[in-house]
Structures are given as structure tokens and as C-alpha cells.
Amino acid sequence: MELTDHLFRHEAGRMVAVLTRIFGVHNLALAEDVVQDAFCRALEVWSFRGVPENPSAWLMTAAKNRALDLMRREKTARTYEPELSRWLQSEWTLASELQEMFADNAIRDDQLRMMFSCCHPRLPEEAQVMLILNILCGFGVNEVASAFVTTYTAVEKRIPRAKKVLAGSNKLFDTHAPADFSARLPAVQRALYLLFNEGYHGASVEFAVRAELCDEAMRLTKLLLEHSLGAIPSSYALSALMCLNRARLPARVDASGKLNSLFDQDRSLWDKELIDEGLQLLNLSAEGAELTEYHVEAGIAAVHASATTMQSTDWQEIVSLYDTLMTIRPTPIVALNRAIAIGQRDGAECGLQELRAISDPDRLAKYPFYYAAFGEFELQNGRAENAIRHFEIALKLARSPMERQFFENRILGCQQ
Amino acid sequence: MSDFTFLYRGRDTNASPEQMQKTMEKWRTWFKQLGEQGHLKDIGHPLEHSGKVVRGKQKSVTDGPFAEAKDVVGGFTLIQARDLEQAAELSKGCPILEAGGSVEVRPIQAINM
């Protein structure tokens, strides 16, 4: 039997979530040890004996047995959750209660609980995303570092620090308390959104890494949609925007890691099924009075995904969606994208005007695509010299080899 | 053809789940290749990393083995090869080497000299 891709990684997240629920969040490290032990065991046994019929169940059982073992041995040495301490007094209740805690729906709840716990208000957003990647997606320190294009040492310091905050919170987040759930939901959505963007816009060179980050964000967002309190319009909108953008990723970054702008993407590479799914989710999100940034961004992605060519894109619609987005989240990047859309609608000269009109341009001073936007419009206006100057600034600011190659190609394009 | 054992030592307990899955798949590929080339006499067994050691006339029993993790035998395989050189060459494909482990290649003593 062959294993599905990333099975270990996905199971790791599920197993740590359920074991942390059993042991208590202060025993997070213990839960992680138990899971690591189960994987070491699987690696050794499966290498010799082959992959078992139901690998997920095998891993869960290995973790469960190891957990039971540890609990019997350390009954007195550790403190567990109060209910667990009660079960520990009787061997029979322990085994049967544990059985129930490893049921599928319980595990789904546990993942959600962990996801909400990771979005602890005392943690900066980036740390929340790193925790989710590490604990729920089973990314090792190395893998988190490569996802964020940062060093191993930086991540190696940040993750334990964040875990200390998590373990110090005494209790896992209670996902059955409606008021608390709704209060933290925006932070969870935001973390999942950032995780997705790290894959879609991030600087990682490898297509595989980027796709995985997007897929992980989508998988976790689906968990939100499976919960009665999580399945609200803004979650559907978030899920829609992920599907609609993920559908275009294979054309945006090709297998060799080359970045393609929307102008020269091969649209036949877009994933039609995912676009349909995204449009359906967008329909489901159109309810209630609240219009979130996810609604608007999903709307923009839907317009792009529905256009068969760059020219037939409904730029009027996109500009008006960016106008709305500016009222919800007026960031310089949103302003930049709005200016680009206006340039597409009204011509390069108007685009340049809008670019110059962006307030607070200092905040874009290090963002290479700000200068690239000037370059594109100058080029469209036939001023190749000016365009090259802008692309050269962008090239200097490029954050990855992939971006560097992209701007070098633009400069070459100006010289032809 | 003569018989040899491969004794595997070393265990990378810090690997990420993704790395472990990849390592496991490498082991399976390696065993498959050995089998197809007719070198795999018995795939052998992985061993638990803990156990007991019974020693000497007193038959004293201690928990063990008390070696460093990297020195504990984690499994064994029976191999058929032309000679010791070929057996050692075959062992170079073992994934445990990439994790800093080792393979000890030992000829099994023959009955017919």
C-alpha cells in the first residue's frame, strides 16, 4: 500500500491536537513527544513490514498506547486535566474514555480548539501563523523557516517562545462557548488568511512549498466551515477567496519557480473545478449585513477568475471593489492595487496619476512591486527609459531570486 | 553467494513528520531494490530501542542496552552477496546513513569452509 502525500504531517496535527486535549495544554510538550515517538515507530516498523491497511488508525493507536503507558507510569508525577485525573483512578474508565476521545468527530473538534488556542491575543500575528504551521500542520522548524524565508535560528527561537505562551494559558480554548468563539473567530480567520498569503504572495522559491501553504490554509478553513459557529458568511468568503486564488497559482508560479504576472499567465492552467467551488462558496457568503475584506477580495478574485483574457476583465467592477476595500482596510498595498486597476480601466496615464496620489507612499518604499507598477505604466506609454529606471529600483528591492528574475525579465522586455 | 547481516544503528528523533515519511519511503525503495537484485535473504526486523541485558554467572538482569542512542542496534537484515566488499557496497544505499547512522556489515560464519 502507498501512503498519500503528507500523511505524516497531517496526522501529526491531528494527533497533537487530541493529545493536548487529553493531557491539558500545559503538557503540550508531552503530547508532542508522544506523537514524535509514534512516528519513529511507524518509520521503523513500516519500513520493514510495509504500510498497514489503515495507516492513520495505526498511528493513532500507537500514540494512544504510548499515552496510556506514560499516564500509568507518571500518574503521580504529573498533573493532568481534572477529568482525566478522575479517569486515571480506574483503569477501565481510562481505556474506554480514551477510546471516545480518539473518535473522528472529537479529533475534528480538537483541531479547531487548537487552532483557536494558537491565535492567543498575547501572540503577534506572525507567531500565531508559525504555531499553526508547526502544531496543526506538522511543519518542522526547518520547514517553517523555509516557508517564511527566514533562518532556522529565528524560527527555533520564536516557536518555543510562542509555545510557552500557549502552554501558560492553562486551558485550551473552549469552542463551545458561543461568545468566546465569535470574539476570537476574526483572529483565527486572519491567521488562516495570512497563512494562505504566505503561500500565494510569499517569497518562497519552491512552487511545492507555496502550494502546500495554500492547501494547509484551505484545509483548516474547511474545519471552520464544519463548525456551526464557524460557518458564517465571512468564513465562506475567506474560503472562496482561497479557492479562487489557489486555482490560479499554477499559472502564477510555474514548476521552475518562475513568477508570471497576470498579463502573461497561461489561463488554461487555471483549475476550473476550484474556480467553480470558489464561486459557490462566494454565493454562500452573500448573506447577512456584514461585508468583510474577505468578501471583497473574493469578489476581486472572482472577477479575475471569470475573465477569459486580460482584456476582457471587468476592470470597472474591480476598481469599485477596491474602492470598497479601501474603506474596510485602507493599506498602501490595497491603494497600490487600486491604482493598477484604474490604470487598466482608464489607461496608463491615469494609472500613473493614481500611483502618485497614493497617500503615505513611504510605507511602500521597500516594496518592489510599487516601482514595478510605475515601470509597467511607463512602458505602456512608450517611455522605455523611464520604465527601466523603475524596474531597476524594483530589482534592487527584490526579496527572492524568483522576484529578481521576474524584474530582470521586465528590464529585458523594455529593451526590446 | 555468501550470507551477511546488516545491523542498523542510529535514529533521528528530531526529524519532522514530512522528513520521516520521506525516509520511510526511501527504506521501502531500498529494500525493494535489494529484493529485485536477489540480495534480500530475509528483510529481518526492526527492534525496540529498550530491553533487558542479562549478564554473567550471576545472571544479573539490567534494563538496557545502555548505549548512546546512536549506538543502539535498531534492526537487522539478512543479505546475500558475492563477498564482503559487495555487501558493504550494497549497504551504502541504506537511508540510515543520511541521518548520520551506520550500517555494520558482518559475514555470517559458513558451515562449509
Image (cartoon, coloured by chain):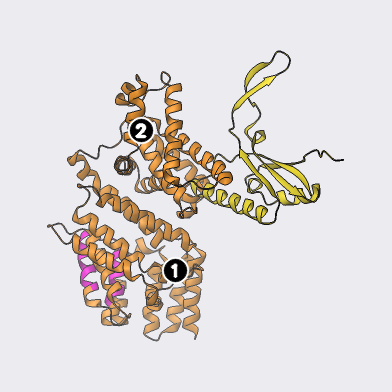
Chain drawn in orange: A
Around disc 2, counting alpha carbons within 10 Å, would you say few (fewer than 14), some (14 to 19), or many (20 or more)?
many
Q: Tell me the subunit letter for badge 1.
A: A
Q: Residue at x 42, y 57 (%)?
A: A212
Work out whether residue A155 can be spotted: yes
Q: Residue at x 56, y 44 (%)?
A: A49
Q: Is residue A176 left or right of residue B10?
A: left
- Dot 1 lies on which element? loop
Q: Disc 2 designates what residue?
A: A25
Residue A253 is marked as: 1
Pick the residue in front: A309 or A343.
Answer: A309
In this view, the residue farthest toward the left is A289
Whole-percent x, y for residue A246 in the image: 36, 64
**Residue stretch rendered in magenta on the structure:** A318-342
- Dot 2 lies on which element? helix
Query: Magenta part mainly helix, strand or loop?
Result: helix
Pick the residue in front: B79 or A164.
Answer: B79
Whole-percent x, y for residue A57 in the image: 41, 42
Can you say whether A223 is above or below A276 in the image? Answer: above
- Place residue B64 in its image quadrant: top right
| Mark 2–mark 1 distance (CA, rounded to whole Å) | 39 Å
Q: Is residue A323 magenta?
A: yes
Around disc 1, counting alpha carbons within 10 Å, would you say few (fewer than 14), some (14 to 19), or many (20 or more)?
many
Whole-percent x, y for residue A132 in the image: 38, 46
Q: What amino acid type should be assigned to the residue bearing mark 1?
A: Val
Colour of chain B, in one word, is: yellow
